[in-house]
Amino acid sequence: MIVSIIGLIVISLVVLAIEIFLTPANGKYPEHPGGQGENTSSAPCWQNEDYSIKQSCAPCSQFEKVSKHLPACVLTGFKEIVSCKVSGEVYRSCDKVQWLDERNFFIFESCMACLSIVGAMVVTFRQKQLDKRMLMRIQQQISAGV
């Protein structure tokens, strides 16, 4: 039991080390090509101009995905409004919505905690049943005089 717990801890540490190694240092992933939104130039404005993020990454609505009105929504299903100094506001594609990932993580962790509590209760109940059965056998052997 202890060996398996130590093994799981070691595997977790190895996975974390690999993830840290493979994650970019600045936390930004490469941009998707063609995610320039309303911009008609060949290169997106945020690559050539100073820009600020006006609205952080948010999921696109089902209508925006189906209608293909925003090219940024077609690529990943998430959009971000960027305000460029010269070109103005454009949409760009982004990889993930942070609060959505955090919510999914906490839902998963809550489910795992509930399942572990239920599992512990089942194990405790079964152990009590087995202890009662063993005591009854011992009492029968003592009363039989064996």
Image (cartoon, grey):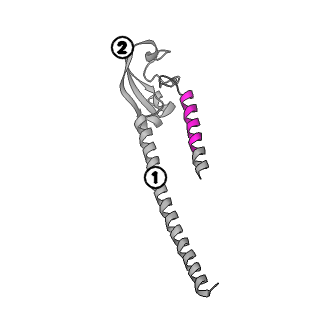
Residue 96 - label: none
In the displayed structure, does residue 16 sit left or right of residue 89?
right
Viewer-nearest residue: 123 or 20? 123
Q: Is residue 1 visible?
A: yes
| Residue at the extreme front of the image, as rendered | 145
| Residue at the extreme right of the image, as rendered | 146
Q: Position of residue 19 (x, y in %)?
A: 55, 32
Q: Residue at x 58, y 40 (%)?
A: 10
**Residue occupied by mark 1:** 113
Q: Position of residue 11 (x, y in %)?
A: 59, 40
| Residue at the extreme bottom of the image, as rendered | 144
Residue 85 - label: 2
Q: Position of residue 66 (x, y in %)?
A: 47, 37
**Label 1: few (<14), some or many (≥20) within 10 Å?**
few
Tell me the element at label 2.
Answer: loop
Dominant secondary structure of the residues highlighted in magenta in the image: helix
In the displayed structure, does residue 128 sit left or right of residue 52?
right
The stretch drawn in magenta includes residue 122: no
Viewer-nearest residue: 135 or 86? 135
Mark 1 or 2, which is nearer the eye?
Answer: 1
**Label 2: few (<14), some or many (≥20) within 10 Å?**
few
- Look at the picture and state if 132 lies above or below 114: below
Q: Is residue 59 visible?
A: no
Q: Residue at x 55, y 79 (%)?
A: 136
- Look at the picture and state if 75 lies above or below 39: below
Q: In this picture, which residue range is highlighted in magenta?
A: 8-22
Count of marks, rendered view: 2
